[in-house]
Amino acid sequence: MRLERRLEQPWWLGLAIPVGSLAVAFGIMAIVLAATGHDPGHTYRTVVDAGFTGNGALSATFLSATPILFTGLAAAAAFRMQLFNIGAEGQLYLGAVGGSWIALQLGDRGAGSTFVYVVAMCAAAAALGAAWALIPGVLRAFAHTNEIITSLMLNYVAAYLITYVIFDSSSYWRDISTLQARSFPQGKPMPDASEWPTFGTSVVVPLGFLVGLAAAFVLWVLYSRTRFGFEVSVIADSPRAARDAAQGPRRDGPLGRARRARGRQPDRRFHAHARPDRTAGSGVRLHRDRRRGARSLQPLRGLRGRGANRRAAERRVHAPGRRLSLRSRRRHAGSHPVLRTWGRGSESISLAHRAAHENPGGNGPGAGDMNARLRLAFAGETMFPHAFPRPGFARANSGLAQTQRGPLLLENVGNLPVPHTPSLAHWPSGVGQ
Amino acid sequence: MSAGMLASINDDLEVVVLAQAVLYGTPLLFAALGELLAERSGVLNLGVEGMMLFGAAVGYWATLRVHGSDASVLVLAVGAAGLAGAAMAAIHAFLTVTLRASQIVSGLALTIFAGGLGLSAYFGNELHLADHPASHEFGSIDVFGLKDVAVLGPVLFNQSALVYASWVLTLAVGLYLARTRWGLNVRAVGEAPASADAMGINVTLYRYVHVLLGGALAGVGGACYSLLITPGWVAGDTLVNGAGWIAIALVIFAFWRAELCLVGAYLFGGLSALPFALQAHGVTVTPELLQSLPYAMTVVVLVLVSTAFAKRRLGAPAALGRPYAREER
């Protein structure tokens, strides 16, 4: 049996994997339960009852799901960079320390507005949790320390810190007002006004859960709909390719870097470098037809408008020698989803070319280069359809480039994978018929 | 008279901490040697903590179930713990070597699956391990009657059989990796699996064997806790309490060498033993500060090692963490 990596994921797989995993997990658990003399059906009915259908069960589920929702988002944010922040537990503890500290402080000062409490607690908890996550983050960035182990070790430190905060008699959090609290260590009671509001009567949804949903939405937009998110995914796949892109051509020099830092003329640096006939990032491609030797400007797919508006837009775009401002380029890109968000898309294309030329083997430290190239090639296809007249082709090439280029021995020939040929629909008519 | 004087030296705080360092370092040493074997073959196994917890539970269960002389029961229990660890490692090996899943994700999942909230807790609660007091436990062996020798006596000659076994094992692993053909093959598989494959070495087999061996040693390391250090079993992950993670850090700290694992294990063993020894001697330091010391020190040591590491690659297997597929590279 041979297993091969998928080059593309079918759309249904994203849903099928979690659902299938859950089903298999419940199946295996049923076997374990049956083997140890429990009735799986009864156990699962109890689970569903206690979690969802029972009296007040759904409210309790919402409540206990809230911290998991937040810590899940915390892990997901780092995973997007292929960083494994498994210190969410410690960061959660620090958030509890920070949130409770500000609430107790406000209580001492007699604050009465729940809104003030909620905002202050969120801010303090987020700040302290981020500070705790900053330790493995900084160590990762500057000392190349394995973030998995450091973030996990800090979980234990945070757990001892929270024990200290509650148990130590000189701690600010320790309640020493009553005799009982002095003998059995416990934290100070939080002020009444600091209790977060809830919504609903039969099913109670805590405010924190809604905040978590909002945070999830914001993260989703950030990572899948913004240039920042795209950069994150490129850096995650190949820090090296990303560094190439960030540095630009070498002759750019410090002046160019400073100019780039100010954000002006963002597209020019690849203009001369990648291909001189590409008006990079302008939403237009200068097309040279080999046979006719003529030049024509070809608008990108996705110009906004229909009829006269569309023609006007194309006229604007076709105007020779006209430089378009970044904003108007964005406008011309119109409803094109990829180009709208990644205005400087041509960087990606030339980046893909550069990476392919400079590191053909995909060997060595930039093992993710191939993946990044693949990703960029896809982005390029969507953004520059004319540069890739046969969409299947780039994909086919990336598949081929992943094959081993070891010594060509007779025994290896049988193992060479068949190239993924592009579908016939993309070839000129007459071929293959 | 002189014997009495020497004995009093051996009651000193420093000597007690040293002796305890060896004791507390032993599970770390077992687990680190196991992880070393797996990583030298190119497979990173982050499931050490989970395998240790499961090994601890199974080892303790074996002492309750098997009847016989102390020695035979304990040998069987350690064997059972090793098998339990290997069984957990087999999951990891299947996922990462055969299916080529991400080694990081698989290892983390293994820790969660086998760990304090997962299989080991289910196993222990189901068999009511926590209700039974320990019936068999490792005692210290007075080797050559040298127990009362100043300083060295309690540290080296009055330890349990597991400690002596760990010394033999360190030597064996060191020699195996450095001096035998199999060891050479393991290193080849970890450094350049494609070349090893071309040489006719069975990469899959070597990785499976060493991940399983690593799991077995992690299981034995867990049994050190439930049979030696704190005989008994408690639910949750307090029994092992992060030692598996420290063991993984130890392998990095030891630059992937067996003899340095020993040094590191005793260093961290000493840090783990310090709070108890200090408390016993009536020194009042914030206990939480002392208890978090091994974890904080792990971070510090990792940073020191990684900065040195960034300058030159010190011993890390080149293919560590990368699945090997014959057609790709």
Image (cartoon, coloured by chain):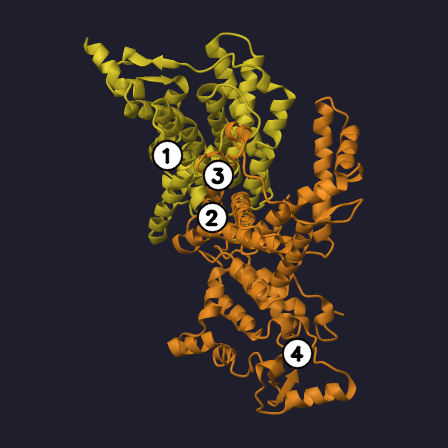
Q: CA distance from mark 2 to mark 4?
A: 40 Å
Q: Which residue is mark 1?
A: B261
**Marks 2 and 4, the one that precedes in the sequence:** 2
Is B324 or B91 nearer to us in this picture? Answer: B91
Q: Which residue is mark 4?
A: A333
Q: Secondary structure at mark 1?
A: helix
In front of the other: label 3 or label 1?
3
Q: Amino acid at mark 2?
A: Glu
**Marks 4 and 3, the one that precedes in the sequence:** 3
| Residue A69 visible in this rendered orientation of the protein | yes
Mark 3 touching mark 1, by CB under 8 A? no
Q: Chain of mark 1?
A: B
Q: CA distance from mark 3 to mark 1?
A: 35 Å
Which label number is shown at residue A165? 3
Q: Colour of chain A?
A: orange
Using a 10 Å C-alpha cutoff, classify the residue at mark 1 as few (fewer than 14 neighbours), some (14 to 19) or many (20 or more): many
Q: Chain of mark 2?
A: A
Q: Which residue is mark 2?
A: A147
Q: CA distance from mark 2 to mark 1?
A: 21 Å
Q: Amino acid at mark 1?
A: Cys
